[in-house]
Image: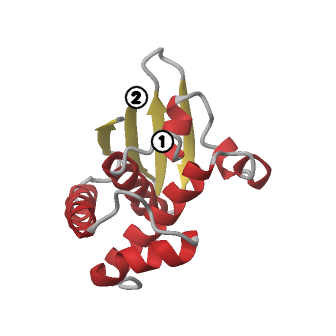
Amino acid sequence: MRIRIARVHGRHQLHCIRPDGSHSKAAAGPDLPHHDLAHYVAERALGLNNGFFGAIAAGRSIDELSDPTIIRTLPREAWDAEVLARTLQGTDNGTVHAADFIASVTLERGAPFEGLDDGVVSRMIAEFSALLRRWEEVPEGGLLELDWP
């Protein structure tokens, strides 16, 4: 799947194009590109195929994944992806220190996350930071393109 995050008139647009040509597109608020990039990094790093981008790749729309009634029907892995994305985003905005990442995820999940260790956390933070720098360089009317998975 091809992921495009565009800057459009001071807002942002997320557009996901599946290999079969079907797609989902939605306008996003000013902070959502960071959150979407955190999902991208965390889900790829931990092989979460049923998180936000995995659900879109499987046919869900972005709008469906914003609906609380649909969110409650998603598998546990979707919640895990959300916890990881929020925690990763917190490392950028200063609400989570890298040294506290695993403890924060464990506390919110209520259990340790298998496969999450200091090395994985360091790689996720580095990739997230690099993607944020790339995003900051995108001009008005431009876009950042990524491949999933």
Give x and y (percent) for residue 93.
37, 79
Pointer 1 residue: 53
Give x and y (percent) for residue 100.
35, 83
Relative vertical location of residue 99 with respect to residue 5 in this rendering, above or below: below
Give x and y (percent) for residue 102.
38, 74
In front here: 67 or 102? 102
What mark, if any, has residue 137 been given in the picture?
none
* Residue at left offset 54%, top offset 35%: 56
The amino acid beneath tag 2 is: Met
Distance from label 2 to label 1 (Cα)? 9 Å
In front here: 57 or 10? 57
Give x and y (percent) for residue 62.
60, 42
Q: Quadrant of residue 149?
A: top left
* Residue at left offset 48%, top offset 17%: 21
Relative vertical location of residue 103 with respect to residue 62 in this rendering, above or below: below
Relative vertical location of residue 136 with respect to residue 99 in this rendering, above or below: above
Label 1 Cα neighbours within 10 Å, binned few <14 / some 14-19 / many ≥20: many
Q: Is residue 45 left or right of residue 24?
A: left
